[in-house]
Amino acid sequence: MLMNDLRSSGRAAVLALFCLFSCESIVIADHIYDLQTNAIENNKSEFGHWGYDPTNYKQWGTHSNRLIPVYTFGTLSSNATDGKLPPVDLRNFTGPNSPYRSEAALRRLYGRVPPNTVNPQAEYLDQTNIYDLQMAGFASGKKYVFLVVFDGMDWQTTRAASIYKTQSIAYDSGRGTGLHFQDYKAGGTTQFGFMCTSPHNAGTKTDPDTQTVLNPGGTLFGGYNAEHGGPNPWTPGTDRLYLIGKSTDKGFLHAYTDSSSSATSMTCGIKTFNDGVNIDPLGQPVRTIAHWAQEQGYSVGAVTSVPISHATPAATYAHNVERDDYQDLTRDLIGLKSIIHPDQPLSGLDVLIGGGYGHVRKTDLVEATEAEPIRHPAGGNFVPGNMYLTDADLAKVDVKNGGKYVTAVRTAGVNGRQRLADAAREAAATGKRLLGFYGNGKYSGHLPFATADGQYDPPIGRGGPKKIEVYEPADLEENPLLTDMASAAIEVLSKNPKGFWLMVEAGDVDWGNHDNNIDNSIGATLAGDSAVKTVTDWVEKHSNWDESLVIVTADHGHYLIMEKPEMLITPKH
């Protein structure tokens, strides 16, 4: 609180001094920081709130069942013949082709027809159709397939970032404008849609030691009711409680997803339970698109701004009934024996770059809550030390010790961007794989959070003053950016003449929204947008939209409601 008071008083003094010598209008410094700080301190803001109660700014701190925007590049084509759409076209899964218009399609997705989910007017696709679209891309001859996931970014989050960036309210429905992935046309091949992210079910209990599901079907099944949830991302439904798994009418309850279930849908093409990673609802491992692509001779990779084995990057390649079994998930990602592959390990990704560095734990213990008892999600084989990548596993895969990976690890006094670039060049030149391990261990291992103004000074959020992240100069110097990670991955993967598949995750969007922190949320969205531009710039320079496919979307939404979005525009005085 004192820090915020000093910061605010310092700004006020500068503004007052400026006004003594100038009658020109000036812009208030870091308006979003101040807006967020005041919202938390008062637990209320005129601009909006997380949750359905406008009098409680931080009422809701987790996911929702909102429909999620989908932007594609390299899909729209004029090659339709006999009235049929080409296989790589978003319209194969929307409008009349939406699986939510068909009982049979829903039964294939969910294993049943969820109540109040069939919708003859549905315009939305399902999250599993993202997998279908990627597979169609490869089948049609695409050499390069990119899946860019903004973890936790719904339409409202995107709009908030656009308003701040453009300093205007340019749209109130549809695709939107202002961000690169909204405005980029990809030679006329871009499309826009939105999708349902509901899981197979929530409430499944598992045993990480035996890798088994204890109660198939859990406690609440998935589905989507358009009347209660809204027919599209920008039109509210009739029941504000519904989107967060609550309702005054119990007949309309549907589970909302977590990141592991949703990412599994996009990489495996199936619905599964919350907390499962590439596992079907009964606990059986499922092949991902990365497994398939690698088998066909493509190179495969994943990069993320959060720890390397968090749900979304893990779901590119690993198998586990428990998303928090981080060390075993990492072993799958880098081709080591794991709890679920004890005899014959997976081959491993060709490139893996992300966070987790410095996050050390003595135990994997998860404290009890009202909802669940004490858990040990990593099971009996947890190794004290780094939560995500053990020292032994890192040494085992390093080329210096006979492993397959050139490793780039955060090092004191070493520029992270340069170190990663050097490692990428070495891996590309020698035909080796690349493993990048960065982050800030003091704050769970993620990359430093950029705020809306591009600085790295997060304001107070849902977690209160003790959870404010304060970075040292070394945290910024020794870590690369997500754009650097994407560039390094592409440099290595593109050496394969067959082509490649790459997942890029802006994972910090989710962390910002969990924290009810509009400054962090906007900053993370803008940082992720820069990574998208890195991808599309590469396609423009080294490929074309006939042989490349880029999908930009999110795994799920949160529950930001903007009452007065114009308040995100910086006022002038």
Image: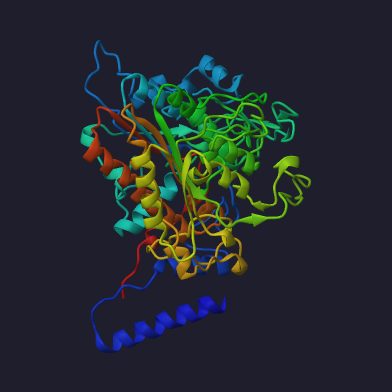
Number of numbered markers: 0
> Residue drawn at (25%, 10%), measured in percent from left and top?
82
- 483 lies left or right of 559: left
> Residue drawn at (51%, 33%), measured in percent from left and top?
348
Q: How is the image coloured?
A: rainbow
> Which of 380 and 321 lies nearest the eye of the viewer?
380
> Which of 450 and 173 lies nearest the eye of the viewer?
450
Q: As displayed, is residue 267 above or below residue 68?
A: above
Query: From where the camera sits, is residue 334 visible?
Result: yes
> Residue drawn at (39%, 69%), measured in percent from left and top?
30
Taking the view exactly as shown, the residue that stands out farthest to the top is: 82
Q: In which quarter of the image is residue 338?
A: top right
- 103 lies left or right of 497: right
Q: As displayed, is residue 510 above or below residue 144?
A: below
* Residue 324: image location, x then y, percent: 65, 43
Q: As displayed, is residue 81 above or below residue 214?
A: above
- 405 lies left or right of 468: left
* Residue 137: image location, x then y, percent: 35, 24
* Residue 480: image location, x then y, percent: 41, 56
- 162 lies left or right of 66: left
Query: From where the camera sits, is residue 246 visible?
Result: no
* Residue 411: image location, x then y, percent: 49, 60
Quadrant of the drawing holding the N terminus: bottom right
> Residue drawn at (21%, 22%), measured in percent from left and top?
78
Quadrant of the drawing holding the C terminus: bottom left
